[in-house]
Amino acid sequence: MITGKNYIGNVLSSLGTKTYKTFNPQTNLENEIVYTEASTVEIQVAVELASKAFKIFKTVSGAKKSNFLNEIANEIEGLGDELIKTYCSETGLSEGRAIGERGRTVFQLRSFANLVKEGSWVEATIDTSNVNRQPIPKVDIRKMYIPLGPVVVFGASNFPLAYSTAGGDTAAAFAAGCPVIVKSHPMHAGTGELVASAIINAALTTAMPNGVFSNLNSSGIEVGQILVKHSEVKAVGFTGSIQGGKALYDIAAQREEPIPVFAEMGSVNPVILLPKITKSKGTEWAKTYAGSITLGSGQFCTNPGLILGIKGEDLDNFILVLSEEIIKIKPTCMLHPNIIEAYENNKAKMLEQKGLETTASINNKVSKNYGRQIVTTVKGATFLANINLHQEVFGPFSMVVQCENVDQLEEIISNLEGQLTGTILGDENELIEYSEIISLLQNRVGRIIFNGVPTGVEVCSAMVHGGPYPASTDSRFTAVGINSIKRWVRPFSFQSWPNELLPIELKNENPLKISRLVDGVKTSKSL
C-alpha cells in the first residue's frame, strides 16, 4: 500500500508541508496519491539514524549482508502486480519493460548477495613480518577494503527500478556495508515507496539496524542539496543529467570535508562507420540503428546520438536508409511532460545551429507526451567548429557527421567530451587498418563496442558503465556490475596488529577460506 509518506528508518513519516503528485504520461493526467516532501527535521533524523546504523552495519558479516540482499529481492518479487502497475502509471513505459527492469533489479541484488557471501571482494592482502630482514626489520601489514559510511542515492528518472531505490547504487552500497538514504525521484515516487517498503521489510526480517535505509520524498532539488551538504553523509550516487550531477559534485567538493560523488551523466555515445562496412553492410546497419535510436523513446544513457563516417556515396546511402527506416517506427511515450518538453527544447536549439540539416523527422500529429524521432546531418568541419553540436539531446535524436577524410574523423574523435560508450562498425581487417581511430576512441569512452549497438548494458563483472568526464565524475569506476562496490569502500591497513583483534578476513586462520594475496602469492590457505 502506498501512503505518500517518507521512510525515516523503519518509521513512516510526513511532517513536511510541501506536497506533490506523480503523473501518468499515457493518460496525460496526474495520479491520485499525494506525496509529502521530507522536512528538514526528517532529513536530519534520517542521517542521524544512518550514522548510528553504520557503527553496527559495517561489522555485519558477509553472510548476513547476503541474506539481507536476497531478502530485498524476495520482497520486491512479492510486490507482484502492484509494483508493475504503479511503475507503468508513473512512466508511460510498457508492462514488458517494467517486468524486465524488475528482473534486472532482482538479479543485481542477488549478484551482490553472492559476492559478499563468498567474501574475496575485500581483496585481503597480507605482508607478513620478517624480523631478520636487513638493514631494517619488516613489519606485518594487512590491507582490505572497508565501507565509507552513509551513502545518499538519487533515483534516476529513466530507470525507476534498476537505477533507483533498490537499484545498482543501493545494492552495491549495502554489499559494502554502507547504510543508504534514497532521495526518491518525484516522477516515480509511488514505485519508490513500494520498493522502499520491500527494503524495510527485508531489514526487519534479517535484523538489520534501524536506519540502514531511509527513503525521502522530494519534489525539487532542496532535499538532495541538504543531504549532500550533511557532514555525516560520506558518498553520493547519482544517475541523470550533466547539470544535476555537476551541481552535486560541486556541492560535495565545497564541503569542509569533501566527499566523492559518483555521478553517471550525459553521453552521445559516438558510433564510427568505417569505410568497408559502410559499403558492404551500410543498409543493414542503418536499419539496425533506426531501432536503437528510437528504443525506449531514446531515453537511455547509451542512446546512439552521434554517428561518424567518411563523406561519399556509401555514407549517403546509409543516411538515406536510416532516414527512411526511422520514420517507419511509431513514436512512443516519453517519461513525463517535463522530459518531452526538455527534448523538444533541446532539439529546437540543435536545429537552430548553422549547417545542421534534417534528413528525417516525424511531422504528423502524435499522442500527447510522445517523442518524435529525428535524424540530422552535418559536415565534419561544421561539427568541429561548433561545440553546441556536441551536446546530448535526451530522446530519439541522432546526428550523422560527414567527415572529409580519416584525418578529420580522428580530429573529431580527439575533440569529443568523455562518453559512456563508443562503437566501431567495420570488419576485422579495418580494426587493424584504423588502429589510430580505435586508440583515440578508447581514450574518450568507458566501453568500446564492435559491430553492435550501445543500447543495452549487460549486468556482469566485466561491464564498465562509466567513462571520462562528463560521462561520469570518476572514470576509474563502473556504475554497473559487482565491481561497482568499489565506489563505496576505501583501502585500509592494519600494521603489527594482534591476530585475535584483526577483522576475520585478515586473521591468520582465514576462517572464511577467501582468496588472499599473502606475500605476493594468491592463496586461500591459512598462515
Image (spheres, grey):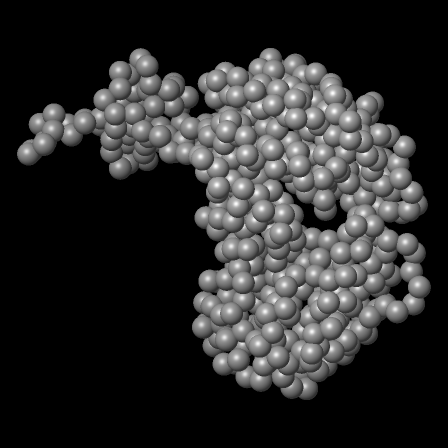
Give percent across and percent down for residue 470.
55, 55
Looking at the image, residue 179 sits to the left or right of residue 392; the answer is left
Quarter that holds the C terminus: top left
Give the quadrant of the N terminus. Answer: top right
Q: Which of 317 and 20 is in front in this view?
A: 20
Q: Where is residue 8, by image quadrant?
A: top right
- Measured along the vertical axis of the image, is residue 451 above or below residue 97? below
Taking the spot 41% from the left edge, 34% from the top edge, the residue there is: 490
Which residue appears at 26% of the width and 19% of the height?
Answer: 497
Percent x, y of residue 270: 60, 65
In the rendered structure, the answer to whether residue 316 lies left or right of residue 34 reads: left
Task: Measuring from the top left, give residue 204's x and y in whole percent.
Answer: 65, 14
Examine the rendering and report whether any part of residue 496 can be seen: yes
Say whether residue 27 is left or right of residue 294.
right
Figure quadrant of residue 29: top right
What residue lies at 76% left-to-right and 58% top-to-bottom? 343
Q: How many labels does the image show?
A: 0
Q: Which quadrant would residue 522 be assigned to in this image?
A: top left
- Of all residues, the one furthest to the left in this rendering is 135
The image shows residue 12 at horizontal and vertical percentages of: 73, 18
Q: Is residue 98 above or below residue 234?
A: below
The answer to whether residue 156 is left or right of residue 80 is left
Taking the spot 54% from the left edge, 18% from the top edge, the residue there is 53
